[in-house]
Image (cartoon, rainbow, N blue to C red):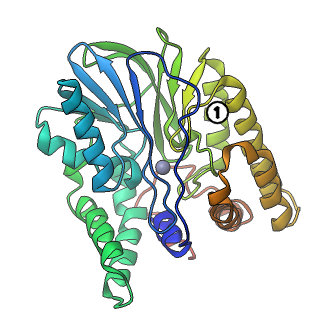
Amino acid sequence: MRLSLFALIMASAAGAAAAGPALPPGYHLIPGAVPLDSGPDGNTIVIDAPRGLIVMDTGRHPEHAQAILDYAKQRHRPIAAIVNSHWHLDHTTGNWDIRKAYPHVQVYASNALKGALQTFLADSRANTDQMLADPKTSAATRDQLLRGRSVIDHPERIAPKHVIAKSARMSIAGRPLDVRLARFAATEGDVWLYDPKTRVAVVGDLVVGLVPFMDTACAEGWSRALGEVARVPFTRLIPGHGPVMTRADFSAWRTAYDNFVACGHSSAKEAQCVAGWEHDAAKFIEPDHRDYVRGAAAYYFETRLRTSPEERQRYCRPLSVATWRKPKA
Ligand SMILES: [Zn+2]
């Protein structure tokens, strides 16, 4: 993935995310690490259900997957279902570790992985091979690259058994949940959950405390999805990365997102838009991550916002090999 490659270049110190406001019983957050010398792990949320545990997102690194397995073991409950918020490898790579331990686990996701495999992930794989061929690539980075490449080469390891094609009330592992599909947002199909019983929303990378990870984003679709999230009466929101949010936190983040996109689409200078993000989202950015966030915001400004009209629309339609042109690096 381009972000992971980008993150690899942005090497420096690591920082751990705080947990934020408390979650109701039956919810357990395994925070995703945001190390600055390798790609991030998405947050994992484990939800109690009658038939076992529901795991929303499974991280990238083996240590993250192990933490999920350890938690299930400690609870003496099987992992009955995985829900992937989106196909980015920092949210799906651990599916395979969990499937190996729980072969009957039911995997739910949108079908967006399909188009991504032929396009973005095919490019990613080529970048991976280039990095593996470079003798300067460290052993630790090599391990991470090989782990990512193995699921691109064997997508059946992470792919859904149940494709979520529309928003609906569903029973997952016997627990009723509102399963929502946002089309053309952070990816072609972003799944998020709302639990009316506890008023918790689990939204994947539709909200990322640090900076919106816009690698495969349709900026307008994403903004619409945030509007849909705002319409549900949640009191706690779990983002794809970073601590749990209150409604007020979410509103502040949404304003920061819309301001950043509007700035990127205006004629304002890059430095002003990046500083705007840092200011508006200051509450969500740990001091250790400031340089990382500044670099990432500049990168997304250049690659997704201040770019040609066609390029801006790249992820606002289905990804297909027929229409894919390699993005300029
Ligand atoms: Zn992510």
Residue located 57% across and 76% down the image: 328
The quadrant the C terminus occupies is bottom right
Give 75 or 111, whichever is nearer the viewer.
75
Q: Residue furthest right?
A: 268
Instruction: Residue 254: give x, y in percent of width and height.
Output: 71, 37
The single residue placed furthest to the top in the displayed view is 197
Q: In what quadrant of the picture does the N terminus appear?
A: bottom left
Q: From the top left corner, tell me how far across and down residue 263 is, in percent.
A: 82, 54
The residue closer to the viewer here, 68 or 269, is 68
Residue 324 seen? no
What amino acid type is highlighted by mark number 1?
Answer: Leu
Tell whether 158 sits left or right of 41: left
Is the residue 217 above or below the residue 164 in the image?
A: below
Q: Residue at x 21, y 48 (%)?
A: 96
Most foreground residue, 46 or 25:
25
Q: Is residue 256 above or below residue 142?
A: above
Read off the residue under disc 1: 226
Q: Residue at x 57, y 22 (%)?
A: 236
**Mark 1 burial class by Cα count in 10 Å: few <14, some 14-19, many 20+:** many
Q: Quadrant of residue 304?
A: bottom right
